[in-house]
């Protein structure tokens, strides 16, 4: 199966891990993703239907518009990928317009523009909800036309919803499979704990996610695969699941001396698991 890249740059994107994830994803009719992000798992699997969720309304709005009006959207956003717009002043003006605008279509165009022209493809908002990623200073930002066309075609099988993971779990029915790629747990309880917690996904959420997965696997016979850092904390949160360790080449510290490879955990909660009560 040919690998397909997402059209968005995304922190923690799963493109490099899709083969491993595919190996551990059970068969089913529908794949539910409560943390869809850039959609690499969606793009590289073959289920009949998809329910793809995220709590970021700008992301879901963009996906729905690209699904509904691909030609118009691609033609319009392409106009922003010229040298004229690849300048700090132009970027800051568009970022300002984005933050003032309530127009869904305009916000979707600016969202993709900022994703490709902003620093490291980050997606970050301040406490007032304003997008605040600085200009990236790239020589010639890539325009992901082919990737958008593929995404739009594949999205005919998908429903995009802006909702939290709790709602996604409630929507699961027998025949569904759930894949969760939550914001990763800190490598230690002191590691960036304040910045981490303010991102909206707390340690309580990490624990709740494990409980939801265990419950939906036993009560609804819906298998759940979760990816996360491999730490004593995540292993305890996912007790009863089948645990598989994946070796990843990832730098996890801005400080060069702290750039160690960190193992990732793929935890599968399956209804037939002998460890589950």
Image (cartoon, grey):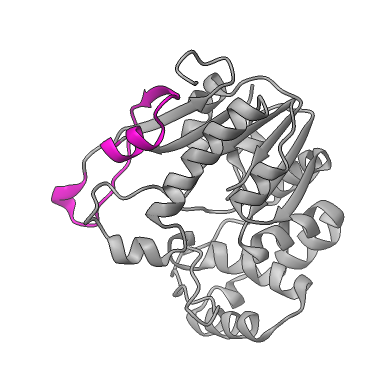
Tell me residue 220's x, y (percent).
68, 29
Residue 108 location (% of width, % of height): 71, 67
- Does 59 appear in magenta? no
The residue shown at (61%, 33%) is 216
In this picture, residue 247 sits left or right of residue 127 = left
Which residue occupies 76% across, 72% down? 104
From this viewpoint, is residue 3 visible? no
Instruction: Name the quadrant containing residue 170.
Output: top right
Q: How many marks?
A: 0
At 67% from the left and 65% from the top, the residue drawn is: 57
Pick the front one: 160 or 115: 160
- The residue most toward the left is 257
Nearest to the observer: residue 111 or residue 238: 238
Describe residue 232's horizontal placement relative to residue 80 as left or right.
left
Which quadrant is the N terminus positioned in?
top right
- What's the residue at 77%, 39% (across, down)? 154
Relative placement, left or right, of 73 versus 192 is: right
Residue 208's place in the image compared with 59, above or below, is: above
**Image: 259 above or below 142:** above
- Residue 194: where, in percent of width, then height? 30, 66
Q: Nearer the viewer, residue 20 or 75?
A: 20
- Does residue 10 appear in this view? yes
- Residue 228, image quadrant: top left
Chain part drawn in magenta? 231-259
Give percent across and percent down for residue 198: 40, 67
């Amino acid at each position: 199966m040919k690998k397909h890249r997402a059209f968005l740059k995304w922190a923690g994107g799963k493109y490099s891990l899709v083969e491993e994830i595919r190996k551990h994803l059970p068969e089913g009719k529908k794949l539910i993703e409560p943390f869809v992000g850039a959609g690499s798992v969606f793009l590289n699997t073959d289920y009949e239907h998809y329910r793809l969720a995220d709590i970021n309304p700008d992301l879901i709005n963009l996906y729905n518009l690209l699904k509904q009006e691909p030609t118009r959207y691609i033609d319009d956003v392409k106009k922003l990928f010229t040298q004229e717009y690849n300048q700090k002043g132009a970027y800051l003006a568009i970022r300002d317009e984005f933050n003032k605008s309530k127009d869904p279509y305009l916000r979707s165009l600016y969202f993709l523009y900022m994703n490709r022209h902003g620093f490291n493809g980050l997606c970050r908002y301040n406490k007032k909800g304003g997008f605040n990623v600085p200009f990236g200073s790239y020589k010639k930002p890539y325009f992901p036309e082919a990737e958008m066309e593929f995404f739009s075609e594949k999205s005919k099988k998908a429903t995009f919803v802006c909702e939290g993971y709790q709602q996604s779990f409630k929507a699961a029915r027998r025949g569904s499979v759930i894949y969760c790629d939550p914001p990763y747990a800190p490598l230690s309880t002191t590691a960036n704990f304040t910045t981490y917690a303010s991102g909206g996904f707390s340690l309580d959420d990490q624990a709740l996610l494990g409980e939801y997965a265990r419950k939906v696997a036993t009560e609804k016979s819906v298998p759940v695969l979760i990816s996360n850092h491999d730490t004593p904390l995540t292993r305890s949160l996912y007790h009863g699941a089948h645990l598989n360790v994946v070796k990843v080449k990832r730098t996890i510290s801005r400080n060069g001396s702290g750039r160690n490879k960190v193992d990732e955990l793929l935890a599968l909660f399956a209804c037939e698991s002998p460890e589950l009560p």
